[in-house]
Amino acid sequence: MYNVAMKLTYFNCRGLGEMIRLLLTDKQIPFEDERFGYADWPSYKPKMQFGQVPCLYVEDEQIVQTGAIMRHLGRAYGLNGHNEQETTFIDMFFEGIRDLHTKYAHLIYGDFENGKEPFIKDVLPVELEKLEKLFKTYSNGELFIAGPKESYADYALFEELDVLLVLSHSALDHFPALKSFHERFSQRSNLKVYLSKRAALNVPINGNGKTIEKKKL
Ligand SMILES: N[C@@H](CCC(=O)N[C@@H](CS)C(=O)NCC(=O)O)C(=O)O
């Protein structure tokens, strides 16, 4: 195990930071979870290489860019596939999730009120179909993205599906492999405790409060 002091700096919402929190929490990797409000952002922004967060401090070294942070953790903690082929597949899957998230973010930070229904009806089924198909590549889609062992991308997938389910409770109804992955993943013991605390605290999903998880205790 890679034993270093880590601190994750991100807004006090789920956003892009949440997949990192999920990975560290699930694997019980100690880290300081530094969350700040929007009023404090101007004092953080100039310290970030691209003026954005999430930022993972590893000892005093800053890592920014969500994909770079996730891949770093993947390499450091063996969540990166068993061989080159698996690693490439995991990277590819992760980028596909990020593409869907970009579309979701346009909705959330754009014309949410008018865009929500068309997004759920027209965009989501097309995008989820692609992920459902790809998810079945390894182990018939019954385990993780790259088969029997979880990877860093599984945390991104779980978080993406979770926010989509808040947007639309029936979002996964036609995608049984993804739906069952989401259910199984939410039952992992460390995550289960974390998810229940998070729901109790009503942590906002996004920065503008467009979607908030309902309490499920
Ligand atoms: N490409 C970056 C994007 C990061 C990003 O968009 N961060 C947003 C929060 S989710 C941010 O810092 N916004 C504040 C700003 O840009 O001033 C990544 O993947 O980490």
Image (cartoon, rainbow, N blue to C red):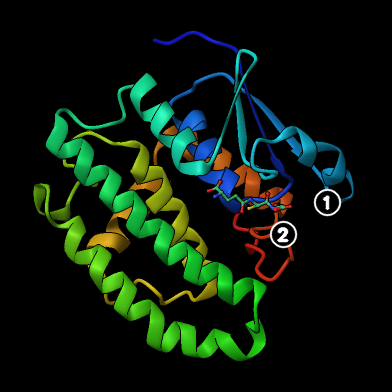
Q: Is residue 152 left or right of residue 169?
A: left
Q: Give the residue at mark 2.
A: 207
Q: Which mark is residue 38?
A: 1
- Amino acid type, residue under disc 2 in the picture: Gly
Residue 71 in the image: x percent, y percent? 39, 33
Vertical order, 32 against 134 (above or below): above
| C-alpha distance separating marks 2 and 1 | 8 Å
In the displayed structure, would residue 207 be above or below residue 94? below
The three-letter code of the residue at mark 1 reads Tyr
Check the picture and name the quadrant holding the N terminus.
top left
Residue 100, how many percent across, how many down?
A: 41, 66
Front position in the image: 66 or 149: 66
**Residue occupying the point 65% across, 68% down:** 211
Q: Is residue 19 left or right of residue 128?
A: right
Q: Residue at x 34, y 50 (%)?
A: 94
Mark 2, residues whose alpha carbon is within 10 Å: few (<14), some, or many (≥20)? Answer: some
Mark 1: C-beta under 8 Å from nearest atom of ligand 1: no
Q: Position of residue 8 (x, y in %)?
A: 63, 30
Circles 2 and 1: CB atoms closer than 8 Å = yes
